[in-house]
Amino acid sequence: MQADELSSLLESELSGLAWSTQPNDLVQFGQDWTRFHQSNASVVFFPNDVEEVQKIIQVANQCDCVVIPSGGRTGYSAGAVATKGEWIISMVRFNQITEFNPIDQTVRVGAGVITEQLQHFATEQGLFYPVDFASSGSSHIAGNIATNAGGIRVLRYGLTRDYVLGLTVVTGAGEILKLNNGLVKNASGLDFRHLFIGSEGILGVVVEAEIKLIKTPPNQAVMLLALSSLEAVMSVFALARKSLLLSSFEFFSDRSLHRVMQHRGFENPFEALHPFYVLLEFDDDEEAAMQVFESGMEAGWVTDGIIAQSIDQAQQLWQYREGISESIAHFTPYKNDISVKISRVPEFMQQLEDVLAAEYPDFETIWFGHIGDGNLHLNILKPENMETTEFKQQCEKVNEHVYGLIATFEGSISAEHGVGLIKKPFLPYSKSAEEIKLMQAVKQVFDPKGVLNRGKVVDCE
Amino acid sequence: MQADELSSLLESELSGLAWSTQPNDLVQFGQDWTRFHQSNASVVFFPNDVEEVQKIIQVANQCDCVVIPSGGRTGYSAGAVATKGEWIISMVRFNQITEFNPIDQTVRVGAGVITEQLQHFATEQGLFYPVDFASSGSSHIAGNIATNAGGIRVLRYGLTRDYVLGLTVVTGAGEILKLNNGLVKNASGLDFRHLFIGSEGILGVVVEAEIKLIKTPPNQAVMLLALSSLEAVMSVFALARKSLLLSSFEFFSDRSLHRVMQHRGFENPFEALHPFYVLLEFDDDEEAAMQVFESGMEAGWVTDGIIAQSIDQAQQLWQYREGISESIAHFTPYKNDISVKISRVPEFMQQLEDVLAAEYPDFETIWFGHIGDGNLHLNILKPENMETTEFKQQCEKVNEHVYGLIATFEGSISAEHGVGLIKKPFLPYSKSAEEIKLMQAVKQVFDPKGVLNRGKVVDCE
């Protein structure tokens, strides 16, 4: 669409809406946390209500324009990135928690409510919203829903999916659907709520959600353990799971720790260097924790350890893990967010290490992950003197090996980041040709003209 | 299809398969626990593996025959009932638990594994499968998946959906899909696993599932309380939820208790009669339980109570609740399985009582339910001298009032029984016209010729 055609639309069918075509806005709202595409949006809309969202989609259908739903733009798979002059629908104005019901223990939230905002609100009500991850200070609830975000406590509390009791969406055809109305039990036909969760904006725009809160767990303790080897990671997990009520079991490598220390100016938490680390969060039980530590030492798996003695120290220990992504951001990391069954993690990691040594000899690889649920984050850092395009191409070559391995293990090429643009070419490593065709067909049901996030996840039919 | 055409098919394309056209089998496998339809099936197949299921569906597609997936036939909505000479695929031979992984804490089960069989298997491994209901001795896992079965512990442990980590299905087009492979985290495109859960056999036949088990909970205590009024029910729920870790909070009326006592020859558990009862199961804490009881007495909500002093007594108390369905089965009950938000239960029940008094003056109504998750079972008993057809028609007239009320409360016309044939006319009370159209379109994607469970849940497009 030419600029003058757009201008005329904005003054006719779309008049009265808030929008921007300021270059700064177009760049900012046209990108996420990846840096592999040139942001190229035509206009950013800032709708105020569901009808305005519907209006934009209806007009997009009329003029065959493509619309991208946009949340906190913290994605790692370019799922909300504009590369072809698309229209952006930013949901920033849907930033209100509009209802709290203490009996149902539910909140009604606008699409643009920040994850942390919901967490704080829950705490103020004496309740708990357990879904949490490094980007919780910026990510929007609707973005979490669109990718079924997981994070650091999935082990105990599950994924975003498990907390969504109701959704209001506008489909690609411009229809408003109210899905499930906040009910706990509802077996009245196909449950489209669960189809929209994790659909990355290719079926509809999430406008509002009803979210379940839960009881506040008991005091949490945090322990950081240094490990002798990769095999020790899962041995310690099995050991810890037996005697502690774990909320998190996070893994990171020596290089990950090194990057955080360098970036934040932290001291080494231990006296010596160790090849691997795990961070455990659990219902406070110092005696049981000491036993895990001691048994781990005796078995030769654990080489050192710290149990946080205060909330401050616990937060400090968490920073060694949560600071990793930020500490490597300026290296334009190529991110693999992969998963296998928990039981297959040790064998998978061993084989993955061999692949990395053989295929990435010149790249620095940083790995860490939510290993208690089978999810590894493998980051490849761009050498300073290499062009981004060249780097991406090289990484994608290696993907064939990494993803080939994942296919052998029946794992996922995207555990929690989604598919977006970046993982789309690799979807066949996790999904059969039949399943991908069915995804295209289902997309067409909800978005017959393919106006929503066209080109992301799967091609239109 | 004529009988001779079928005979010739069974000897050509379908030769080698196990099947029966014995009148007894046709009746038995063509019905569920409802009694409002004449069972009318043409043939019952007993496939042994996924390829045989696929073969049957492929042939059904060629000759435009309709296939009904059949489990334990414990349904209450005629979702697996044959009324038009359909073919039945009985999954009884898929009755094996084929794999247990202690690290993943998962089991791989055939479609025809009985719920109780899985519960016992979990116990033998020192783990727990929490989904439970009155029909667990007969219902198949795949049937539970097809209706997203809930039952008596949803309050704490959620629904069948929450335990399905992987599914193998054969679609209506005859394609085999392996969905999610048992992964905890998997954000690689649309998650069709969750679309199949609760789809009542209109998209595909569930052949195998990977099911998550959980840690065994601490010892459970059981308390039966007699209540003074309907309003007291939710007051006691709020009170109990504060101080007890509830697994169940079940409600039943005096008439329900009366029916169980009569049917099983039980004594009245209390000295006097009371209008309403609630049964609580919770992590054993006698002191807290006594406090709930005493506070409830002081407030005038609770009029009497029993705390089970042994496992035997706990099981006995449970029978007052779990025996209700069986005790009224010979009255051909018309079942309403409805839900609203927990917070709206008191107001809803009050208004429902008024509707019942006005519209069902001549019928005995029995109500009970999993009230801690907003789910009520409302059973209308057929007067002995009334014809079944006449009775069904009269009930359906009253449905307009009951379901109209549910629509006002944004509730569900089917909380856990599914839609099947019986609730299909009433789906518009819970789902918008747009959503029903989308269901039809999605059915067509997975089952283009409508060979699977045609006429159930929604009409084909």
Image (cartoon, coloured by chain):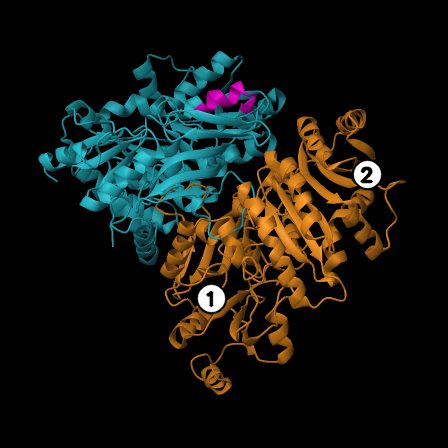
Chain colours: A cyan, B orange
Quadrant the N terminus of chain A occupies: top left
Which labelled disc corresponds to residue B308? 2
Residue B311 in the figure: left or right of residue B396 = right
Marks 2 and 1: which is nearer the front? 1
Say left or right for B419 vs A179.
right
Q: Residue at x 61, y 57 (%)?
A: B397
Q: Is residue A119 magenta?
A: yes
Q: Quadrant of residue B285?
A: top right
Residue for point 70% across, 46% down: B368
> Residue at the location (57% across, 38% down)?
B341
Give x and y (percent) for residue A415.
Answer: 38, 40
Looking at the image, which is closer to me, B214 or A7?
Answer: A7
Region rendered in magenta? A118-127
Cα separation, mark 2 vs mark 1, equals: 48 Å
Say which residue label 1 marks: B454
Is-magenta flag for residue B129? no
Q: Residue furthest right?
A: B271
Determine whether A142 is above or below B379 in the image: above
Identify residue type, mark 1.
Answer: Arg
Q: Is residue A109 above or below residue A200?
A: above
Q: Chain of mark 2?
A: B
**Residue A259 against residue A147 in the figure, above or below:** above
Note whether residue A301 is visible. no
